[in-house]
Image (cartoon, rainbow, N blue to C red):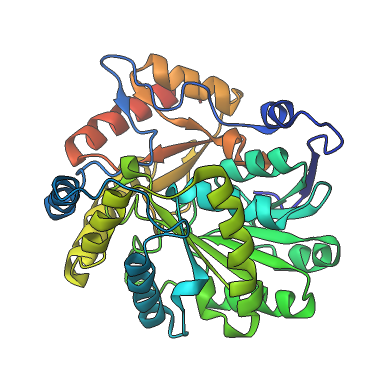
Amino acid sequence: MTSEKTFVNYGSNSSDSAQRILLASRRPASLGSTPAGAIALSMGEPDAGTPSPIVEAAVRALRNGRTRYTNLSGAPELRRSLAERLTVRSGQNVSPEQIVVTHGGSAGLAASILALINPGDQVLIPEPTYSLYADHLAMVGAEAIWVSNRADGTLDLERLAREAADTRMIILCNPGNPTGRVYSMAELRELAVILEAHPHLLLLSDEAYADIVFDGMKFLSALELPAVADQVICCSTFSKTYAMTGWRLGYVVASRRLSEKINLLHRTINGSINTFVQDAALIALETPAEHLRAMAESYQARRDIVVAKLSGIPGLSMLPPQGAFYAFVKIDSVLTSDEMTARFAAAGVIVRSGSEFGPSGEGHVRLSFATDPENLELGLDRFVDAARNFM
């Protein structure tokens, strides 16, 4: 991966936000569809389904008439429970007033960007990374500056520091989608130094996969950077940890000054969140720590399958995933990422084009191993066979 910066102006002077998003978006229109007979290694969705205690809590809530509007910032009891959990995890005092319950993690990201970014603002995006950030920035009319990570997957902190003076926000995905990289404590603390030197600069940390970390690694949340607490916005979701993708429930944590702005934007667009879904989320937060560890270990076992299957094959390379449930595979081929993705689909395995995730993603494809081991093994066999035909 190169460390070159790519500047993308999505036409902040245009009044047509839909056109700006259309020009910016790298996300495929066919997202979520799988042809008959194909194996999908494309979607970031846990395969096991939502645990039954969470489902039963929602059913009870519905039967008890929990179908009415609730607080626009989120149910007070859910905000209290999240605050208590985050205080324990981060070692910092998180109050319920700092939390905005959102319509999925995506709405939390969108509300944060809409609330805090103005047309023409410059935003740094270390990449390869989740493609939705660019779409949100285009919606606002902001200017995205892609900053490629170093070849070893670490942040290009020197370049981020050089760009910081003219930048309003850095958007970080940690653990990373699509690479599965977990940024180290040293990197995040150096990032905090950059923030301290530039009090106008914000850090939006997308921590959707914070509970899915491998090999005993220590995950450091941006909430654990007390010196820059007023500059940090942390977005998360119930989707990955608790297999609640279709429930559409997330949350944002920020200082009260920032969370009030984010809340205003979110409630203006979305209104209140489904009452019974929030009731179920309270039960999700009671999931024993050992169950969460077992979940992470199950993904690590599947990560190990991917590494074993793809290691030693000429023309294929990747950095071993440290978290989340993705592998970002570089393929030595004259084909583009989009062309390779189409070839894989024709061979019966669906993957995502690396170019979706930023300029340095070209030449890569993303595999998701959030599927059962049997399908994963078969899909990887198809993947290797197809790759050998165009390398």
- Residue at horizontal 70%, vertical 49%? 2
Q: Where is residue 346 drawn, in percent x and y?
A: 40, 14
Relative height, residue 118 to residue 38 (above, below): below
- Residue at horizontal 73%, vertical 25%? 19
Decide which of 177, 81 is in the foreground and name it. Answer: 81
Does the rendering let one see residue 297?
Answer: no
Does the rendering let one see residue 1?
Answer: yes
Please state if 301 lies on the left or on the right of 188 as rendered: left
Q: Quadrant of residue 248?
A: top left
Q: Where is residue 184 drawn, in percent x and y?
A: 52, 72
Please state if 102 lies on the left or on the right of 170 as rendered: left
- Residue at horizontal 27%, vertical 54%? 242
Decide which of 206, 293 is in the foreground and name it. Answer: 206
Q: Where is residue 310 drawn, in percent x and y?
A: 36, 41
Relative height, residue 112 to residue 318 (above, below): below
Relative height, residue 247 to residue 348 (above, below): below
